[in-house]
Amino acid sequence: MVTVKHGEAKAESPFERRGLSDEQLVAMFRTMVMQRTLENRGFQLNRQGKIPFASASEGHEAVQAGAAMAFARGKDVLVPYYRDLGLALGIGLTPYEVLLSLFARAADHSAGRQFPHHYASRSLGFHTISSVIAAQLPHAVGAAFALMHGREDGRAVLTTFGDGATSEGEWHESLNFAAVHALPIVFLCENNEWAISTPLAKQMGQPDVYKRAAGYGMPGAVVDGMDPIACYGGVADALARARSGGGPTLLEAKCYRFLSHTTDDDDRTYRSREEVEARRKEDPVPCFERLLIEHGVLTAEGAEALKRSVLEEANDATDRAEAMAYPLAADLYARVYAQRYDPWLDERDGMNDG
Ligand SMILES: Cc1ncc(C[n+]2csc(CCOP(=O)(O)OP(=O)(O)O)c2C)c(N)n1
Ligand SMILES: [Mg+2]
């Protein structure tokens, strides 16, 4: 753990902290720094030829750190999408587990066979997902339906998606079903204004995603996706409503994607450097750091110590994950179904006849 304060701390001054303690605010900041560090690590490893692919979530740190802080570990269920590195870290996935996913090693929760950044953790209540846009939403709604019918009061599902996902049929079907059945679920849109190379204006006539909530008969709300405290507040309110039987919410966090879509994309082909540079002023990581220092929650030295410890942890996780073995071909079907399933053996035993 990092020492929160040392050196000359400024006197604490009041600011809107939504009930979050100093420790929680620093934990959110650490998650944001770790997200950025591991995301850059993914790009480095890809360019070194060590991993095939990584996605980019720079600009999404505030929404994800805020949402993770609102998520009740051990109670709520997370059904994320591929850009949720910070959300994964924030609810308890370790950097080592993230690296195992990127390196596709056998020790990964999905035995190294899922797409990179498609994590899973049964103990954290964290579903694995498909890369097919919006395919996670019917799964999330199904999980919420199961919670409701199992009378598991006080639990809710948090599901996330991008602006582009709102154009998919599953998105509409999922919101409608959740509203009809008043399911305990929060739909969190991470609106970064781009769907790979498709800008928001080519995606939707109404740029405020949250306004569509009215059409389904559920509350809609919008938060500044560059402000982790506002994101925490929005998600906490919506999850509290869902857990107490108040039904679903459509919450929109307006953020921005600073990098290319993934390591396979080159955003210089469809947007100007000037546009991206102008948006850097809103970068949530340095902005939050300034806020915490300004209000005496963290000292400048404390922030530097935190960054050093994050880098050390990321380096250690990288080395340890890289040293692990790849999955064996013989284990192709291990950890695919709840029970061991081996089609080759079944065929020999005549079990595939039917
Ligand atoms: C059904 C489907 N269509 C197209 C794709 C290719 N694809 C992958 S990511 C992506 C963009 C999605 O944009 P958005 O929902 O805004 O999320 P973001 O990546 O911006 O976070 C597309 C079109 C896909 N994976 N699935
Ligand atoms: Mg998008």
Image (cartoon, rainbow, N blue to C red):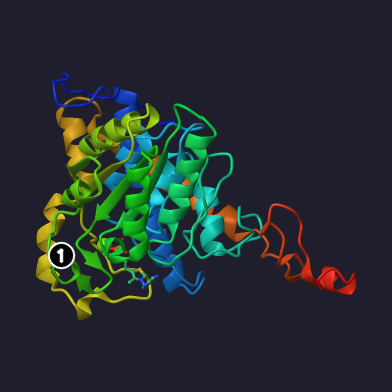
323 relative to 286 in the view: left or right: right
Residue 316 image offset from top left, x and y in percent:
52, 49
Question: Residue drawn 52% across and 32% down?
Answer: 74
Crowdedness of circle 1 by 10 Å Cα count: few (<14), some, many (20+)? some
Question: Residue drawn 71% across and 67% down?
Answer: 332
Under 8 Å from ligand 1: the CB of mark 1? Answer: no
- Three-letter code for the amino acid on which mark 1 is drawn: Val
42 relative to 258 in the view: left or right: right
Kindly state the secondary structure of the residue where label 1 is placed: helix
Residue toward you, 245 or 128: 245
Asked if residue 162 shows in the view, the reply is yes
Residue 334 image offset from top left, x and y in percent:
72, 60
Image region (quadrant) for ligand 1? bottom left
Q: Which residue is mark 1?
A: 276
76 relative to 40 in the view: left or right: right
Question: Residue drawn 38% across and 48% down?
Answer: 159
Q: Which quarter shows the N terminus?
A: top left
The residue lying furthest to the right in this view is 349
Q: Quadrant of residue 347?
A: bottom right
32 relative to 267 in the view: left or right: right
Question: Residue drawn 51% across and 49% down?
Answer: 127
